[in-house]
Structure formats: C-alpha cells, structure tokens
Image (cartoon, rainbow, N blue to C red):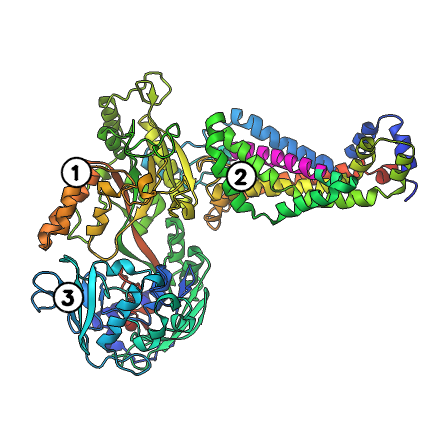
Amino acid sequence: MKRTQILWMGTALAMLGLPALAGGRGTDGELRITFPQATSTLNPYLSSGTKDVYAASMVLEPLAGFDENGAVYPRLVSEIPSKENGGISADNMSITWKLIPGVKWSDGTPLTAADVVFTGAYCNETDSGCAQAFKFDGIEKIEAVDDLTVKITFAAPKANPFNAFVGSQTPILQKAQFENCMGAAAAACTEQNFAPIGTGPFRVTGFSVNDLVQYEANPEYRDAAKPEFATAMIKGGGDSIASARGVMETGEFDYAWNAQINPELQAQMVAAGKGQFIMGFGTNIERLELNLTDPSPDLAEGERSTAKYPNPRLSDVRVRRALSMALDRTALNDIGYGAGGSPNCNIVPAPAFYASDNTGCLTQDIEGAKALLDEAGWKDTDGDGVRDKDGMPLKLLYQTTVNPVRQDFQALIKGWWAEIGVETELKSIDPGVFFGGDPASPDTAEKFYADVEMHANNFDGTDPEAYLAALTTDKAPRPETNWIGTNYNRYANPDYDAISAKLAQTFDMNERAAIAKQMNDMLTKDGMVILPLILRGNLSAMSNTLAGVKVNAWDSEMWNVAQWSRVK
Amino acid sequence: MTDTNAGAFSDRAHSPWAGVWRKFRHHVGAMVGAAVLILLILAVLVGPWLWQIDPAFIEPKAADMMRTRNLAPSLAHPMGTDQLGRDTLARMLAGGKVSLAVGLVAMAIAILVGTAVGVLAGFVRWLDGPLMRLTDFFLALPLLPLLLVMVMLFRDALAGALGIELGTFLLIVGAIGLTSWMQAARVVRGEVLALKEREFVLAARSIGTPPLRIILTHILPNVLSPVMVAATLGFASAIITESALSFLGLGFPPDFPTWGRLLYEGVEYMQMEPNRVLFPGLAISLTVLGINYIGDGLRDALDPRQRLR
C-alpha cells in the first residue's frame, strides 16, 4: 500500500518535473546524511579523503563539475571553455574561464577572479602539503584577466585542460578568509578549515571533528528557490552495515554514502521498504595483477621481484591466459557485489567513449585453460595434481588485503586454479600495510613479493591518459626508485611505452580514444598482464522520501544537493 | 587458619595426588568440564576421519556452488554451509584443531613464564625489582606493533624452515604466549609475597627445607588458584588474539579455518544465518567454560584447607 503510493508519487514527480513541485528555499526540514567514515576537515586541499571532499562539497564549489555521465558542466562559470568559444587556445596552451556575474559568498561578498587565483596559489605553496596538487600538474600560471575572467596557462600543450577547479576536489576558497592560511599556517587555521565560506547551497553552522557536520541553507545562494532543505547534517562513524541500516531499516537517515554490503544483506534491507540502493559506476576495477618478475624468497633482497629475473611461471603469456580463462567472473560478482558490480574485461571500463569492446573473458573455459597449459609444456608428470615443467611445480603465491569479499574471491579462485592444475598459496595483508607504500615493508603492493595480487584501482575524472601511462617500463617499482612506482607488474614493452608517449601528444578526441583502447587491449586481452575481474560501483543507500538524487561516480555524490528535496 | 599444616601433612602421608584426584572426582563442575573438553579434543582429532569432507572444498561449477551456498543445517551438512558452499562441520573440525592447539600451547607458555617470573620475583628479594620492571615493560609495550615486527622478522624464515603452517603456528603461539604472561606474573608475585611470611612457610624454612622444595611443595600448590584463573582467561584470549591476528593478515593464510576466523566471518551473516556464529561461538565458549571448571575443581582439590573438610 505505502509502497505503491511512493511509487506513484515517484512517477508523478518524474512526469511533472521537479520545479513544479518545488516548495522554495528551506521548506523541507532537515536533510540527514550518514557516512561510515567521519569527516575530519572541511578543507579538501588538506585531505584527500573522499569523506572530507564530499562533506565540503555541500559548501564549496568548483568552477565546473562532472555530471552523472562524466561530462563537464558549468557551476560558477557561464559556459564551459572550448576551442569553438575561444576558451581553450588553439595551441592547447591555455584555458580561460568566465565567472557568472553576481555570485556571492555566503557572507555576502562577491566572488571574483582573485579568489580563483588565490586558490591556485594556496595549493601551490609547497610546504602546505596540498592534497590535490596533482590536479594542478603542468600549470605554469593562473592569472586574473579581469574581475570575472581567469586564465590558466600550461607549461606544455595540454590535451585535457579540465583538471584544476573542475570537480569537487578542487573547489574555490574565499581569498579574504584563507589569506593568512598560506603555506605552513594551513593546518593551524582550524577556524577556517572547519567552517569554510563557500558559494554552495549550504553553509556550515557546526562541526565536531570526526563526528558531525551541521549545515543550514545558504541565504546568498544564487538560485533563490534552492536548496529546499532548511538544514542538513552529516553524521560519521560506524560501519557500512550500520549506515545502510540507518537508511533502509530504521529510517534515521535520508542518505548513506558508501553502504558497501554483501548482496544477501542488500536484498534483506530492500525488503524493509524504506529505501533503495543506488549505484554509480565509475572506473573502479577489481583486478588481478600478475608479476612478470620472479618473487622467489631465494633471491637476494634487491633482486627479488626485479627485472633481473623474469617470472619462471608467469612470463609465458599462455600461462597467464590460462589463469584468466579458468575464472568465472560472473560467479565472483554474484558472490561479492551483486547489483553493486558487474563482471568486466577492461582496465578502462568507462567512459564508454574510451572503453574497449572486449568481453572475451566473461565465459569461463576450464578445458581451454587446461589445453593451453598443456601446450605451454606444463604437465602433471608426478601425478600430484599440480602441473610441473623441468621439475618446477606450477605454484603461485596470491596476495590481497584483508577484506571479507576479497577472501571469498581468493578461496574461489584458488579452487578454479586447482581445477586446471595450478596450486595457489593465499596470503592476506592489512590494507594499511599493503597500500602503505613503506619501502621497508615486504608486504606492499609495490614490492609485490608474490606472483599474483588483487586490488582495485580507478582514475580521477574522465581521462585515462595518466592512468594508462602508469604501466610504462620506467614506472616499475625497484630498489633504484626506492620501491616507488605504479607499474606493479614490471611490464616492460617498448611498443607500449611508445604508444603511451603518443597519447600524450594527441589532441584529437577520436584518435585519443583509439589509442586508449589499444593500450587497454595490450594490457588485458592481448598481454594478459592485468586480469580485470569486476567493475565496482559506489553503492549508496537512499530513503524513499528523498527526491532529486542523481548518483554520480565522477564527482561528489552531493554534486546536485541543491536539487534534493523531500517527497511530499 | 593455623590448622592447615596438620591436615596437609597427614594427607601427604599416603599419596598427595591420590587425595587431589579423589577430591577432584567429586567436583561435579570439574568432571563435566573435563568431559566436555575431552569430547571437543576427541572430536577435532578423530572427527576428520569420520567426516571426510574437505573443509576447503568449493563446488567448481558456479551453478553448483550457488546452489550450495548458505544452506541451513541438514543431514548432508549438519552445521550448514558458508557463503561459498563450504561445509561448516568440516571447517569447525579443522578449525578446532588449530584453535585448541593455539589456545593450549600459548596458554602453557604464558602460564609457565608468568608463574616462573612471579615466583622468582616474590621469593628472591633482589630479583623482585628487575623482574617487575620487566613485567611493567612488557605491559607497556604496544602489543600489535610488537607482533607486527615479530611477524615481519620471522614469518618468512620460519615458514621456509618448517613449512607455512607449522611455521605460522609456532610464530603465533610464541607471539601470543610471550605477550600475555604479565598478569599471571603480577598475581603470582603478590600471592607469593603474602605466602612466604605465613607460618607454615616459616616453619618449613626453620627446619631447613631448601628454597626450591619450599617453592614446589608449599608455595606452588597455594598459588595454583590464581594461576588457574589466569590460565583459563589466557586460553580464551589466546583463541581470540589468534583470530585478531588472522584478521590483520598476520596469522594463518586466509583459507585456513580457525574458530576465531569462522566466528569473525560469520558476524556479517549473523542476522540471516545465525548458526554461522552460533557454532564457533558455542565451541569457543564450551572450551573456555570447560577449562574454567577444571581450573575451579583443581583449585578446590589442591587447596589444603578445603581438602581437610
């Protein structure tokens, strides 16, 4: 009964369109949001934590954002710069943004180009430890042409200029407020960092660190009818299950970000009828990385897992292909993620423009895998169920982080590999250590003292250039680089390096897409260096009483919070 | 109070341990506890021969696996199956072997070290200061970083020398044992300090009994009760610490079942499959209770004052 009513209302809303039912600013009471991790600062330049960036995005705005399809849309500017409108220079050396006239900060003062220039300088102050510095890579200078025009000049032609001030990681700070917080003083400015003045739909009224953020509607917000909620709060802490339950079963909250729970529990919570799970699919791919070098503990420290010794088992692409063929990715997804994921064969799964049409890995082929291993010369000569070659058994060490879903994946994959005669030893590592990158620890993803490791990775924004360039030969972690590097697999292919360099020099979008697809295929279906498993979505829970939510995997999930309202 | 010695002396005239056994046998709780513990030990030792399903077996065909997931208890799977269709009974039996062994050995190490340090500190005056500072030092050590370092330094070496399972077992047992003896040491020291001023100890000393004999015959039986309490608590916490270590990825390989791990894995599914936490939880509780009651009975049986009654 109640459910059909809500459904009906939902349909009505969709038909009429939101503005028709909108009740004006502050008419909808309180918006209650819960995060499984609590917010620790509201200045996204001092924390790369998603929880902090999202909480700040209620208040602070960038010049432009990414919409739910990953396209750049204007927020504080009148239009998105392009070559056609002259906003991007013909030589790709600069981009010019034009601010909307009349936008005011929540304290009533006007937003000007000086604020944008200041924000760039704020992040550039080297000793402030700017968490978003990578977004400003390659920028030579940011200057105010006039009060409403900002020009960003790059050091070299830039194929993708939509980095700085695009997306909720790099919002505009108010110069007047943060002027005295440059450099070393940045972290000490608690008053500013805990209640930044913004141009967004809400302003901060209270903040208890690592617990609760309280907001109220910004009286100066440029759309006089928005936001419809008078106040808002973000409560942090607990775990994913508890926050999902708060929305789906008890109804304490309207929205829960990052409610990552297993499919059985999802189904049970949905049955309670108070809310629904919403998924945003970005580029986050759970994958198996194969080590092309020898991780044997018998090798000397400093030579182990380095290019000096190729992996005696995994150097043969047929073995790597057989390992991939033995996997049933659909079963993995059904066990681990359900609606929160989908099986995938690409490391660049989205945006569609850049994604290769590679689906060959989705069918499990145990017999084919066995035949391939036979062909590669790995046969079970001693009858122990494990294949061997030249007296060496086909035995792999497979590591990942401690995480219930990942341990399930390990057990399942070990079983399938046992089927094709590959013995697997499992290892799970504390995520803090695995992703910690401490060169002294033997258990980091970079050291890769194992044959196979499983983790998830994605790229920021919608352009995969930097992400694909991470696999070039020179980026292999090794003693000379103090074990820093992104090419965990120690993939060394001059063709790949060349094509990666070519991508950086290509400005035609269609050509870029073709190159990105080719690079993706070299790593996956042709090279089998990375075995993608699952495209993971961001699972959030939303109350049935909330309207206007559009889940967005490319930007803050609160990107359009001004449009959120209560179903009446 | 003062009449305790006479009783103890007359009992010892035949065999002291026969009296202890007689007393112990009449302690209902202790006998039940012992029966439960023996049953559990027998189950994990003999069980795998009778119940021959491989605890790590997962149906290789995805469709079959989906069918066997999260099954309720039935004849084919008396304790049901887990989220991957593995048989819970087989996992309980395999896990019990590890958990009981870890608990018993770690507890034994902790109690041996703790009692030795406690008795020495209480009985030998000049050792008191240094040993108690050592105890304070260990108490102040943050356990987890210490374990991290131990695992990092020794895991590969031990696993290389003894195989991954035995190597990890020794490392975990050693790590837990060597980091949980402090409470026992403090309690024992306190008891010993009080005991050594008591009349029967003074009397033993006055007739020229050597210190070692005083410790063995007069002091140790009297500190047994706090030691037993510490032991039972230590056993339970050893099982839990092992699961915490596995959780941090420092313990056994992740596909290696232990009771603590089964319990931990089950929590997520608790609402839908309560038996996922019920069985391992019950097994841990029964073991701890069993040992507790045995300790209780032993304390009563060894207490000269109670034996007199």
Which SS class for mark 2?
helix
User: Which residue in the structure is indicated by mark 3?
Assistant: A95
Q: Splitting the image into 4 quarters, where does residue A5 fall?
A: bottom left
User: Which residue in the structure is indicated by mark 1?
Assistant: A494
Percent of width and height locating residue B83: 41, 42
Q: Which residues are magenta?
A: B92-116
Q: Is residue A77 above or below residue A532?
A: below
Residue type at the position of mark 1: Pro
Residue B77 appears anywhere in the view = no
Q: Label 2: chain?
A: B
Out of B163 and A260, give the one closest to the viewer.
B163
Measuring 65% from the left and 41% from the top, which residue is drawn there?
B181
User: Which residue in the structure is indicated by mark 2?
Assistant: B259
Closest to the camera, between mark 2 and mark 1, is 1
The residue carrying pointer 3 sits among few (fewer than 14), some (14 to 19) or many (20 or more) residues within 10 Å by Cα, namely many
Q: Are marks 2 and 3 on the same chain?
A: no
Which SS class for mark 3?
strand
For the residues bearing labels 3 and 1, Cβ distance under 8 angstroms: no
Q: Label 3: chain?
A: A
Q: Quadrant of the C terminus of chain B?
A: top right
Q: Quadrant of the N terminus of chain B?
A: top right
Distance, label 3 to label 1, CA atoms, is: 33 Å
Q: What secondary structure predominates along the stretch shown in magenta? A: helix
Q: Mark on residue B48?
A: none
Percent of width and height locating residue B18: 82, 27
Horizontal arrangement in the rendering, residue A153 relative to residue B256 (left or right): left
Percent of width and height locating residue A346: 22, 44
